[in-house]
Amino acid sequence: MKIASFDIDAQKGFTPLCPDELPVPEGHLIAGALNHLASFAELRLGSKDAHSPQAAWVVQTQAEMLQPLELANADLTWVSHCVPGTPGFELLDTLPAPLAYDYFVWKGVEPDLHPYGACYHDLADTRSTGVIEYLRQQQVDTVLVGGLALDYCVKTTALQLRRAGFRVGVYLPACRAIADHTAAQACEQMRSEGVELYDSAAQLAAAVPQKEA
Ligand code: VGL
């Protein structure tokens, strides 16, 4: 069994450190759990949102968010977040630098794109970011996922990996969600498609063999 871990959008823009972006409650507290998850894996992958401040889906206030859009690859409005060169773009402290990961994806770079999953650039899942091909080429069979936010980018990435044929486990202590009801729906959908969910370090250790030191 070859295991990879995948840190999804573990960026300050999704934490209370950046209250004007998309502050996921407790989002800044997951770095230790992501590092623990990586200790089970031979390969570590990561992703970041990398968005233009002038993106087509940007609205000025949180009250205007979540409105549907007619764009092919940006389904909802969001406030500006994770703009390169700003604090919100940075990974959480104590995570590796992007180039210290074995494979890294920057997503949503084009102003008309706002994908959630890290495996495809478009919402129809047809334009690969190369993650799935990399994992296959490395003969990975299990991918352990954590990050922000559980109910959007983590869920979508886990489902994309599962549909591509990998065993996928989501480590919940390494995730936080935007909202409780969408988190519950996300967990139900992931479970129904065969994604494993681990509630605790003990459950993770029971499901996945510990890497030799
Ligand atoms: C995300 C909402 C908007 C995420 C990104 O990373 O989960 N959520 N943009």
Image (cartoon, rainbow, N blue to C red):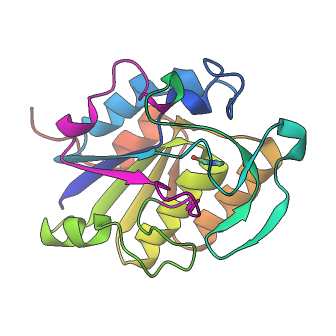
**Residue 132 drawn above or below residue 184:** below
**Residue at position x 54%, y 52% in the image:** 154
Instruction: Give coordinates of residue 140: x percent, y percent.
Output: 20, 64
Residue extending furthest toward the front: 54
- The one nearer the camera, 185 or 192, is 185
Please give left or right for residue 55 compared with residue 60 in the image: left
Tally the marks.
Answer: 0
Quadrant in the picture for the N terminus: bottom left
Q: Is residue 107 magenta?
A: yes
Instruction: Give coordinates of residue 48: x percent, y percent.
Output: 43, 44
Please give left or right for residue 117 compared with residue 20 in the image: left
Q: Is residue 87 magenta?
A: no
**Can residue 95 be seen at all in this image of the molecule?**
yes
**Residue at position x 59%, y 59% in the image:** 114
**Residue at position x 45%, y 78% in the image:** 163
Q: Quadrant of residue 167?
A: bottom left
Q: Which stretch is magenta?
A: 89-117
**Residue at position x 26%, y 52% in the image:** 4
Residue extending furthest toward the right: 63
**Residue 194 drawn above or below residue 144:** below
Q: Quadrant of residue 14?
A: top right
**Residue 137 drawn above or below residue 11:** below
Quadrant in the picture for the C terminus: top left
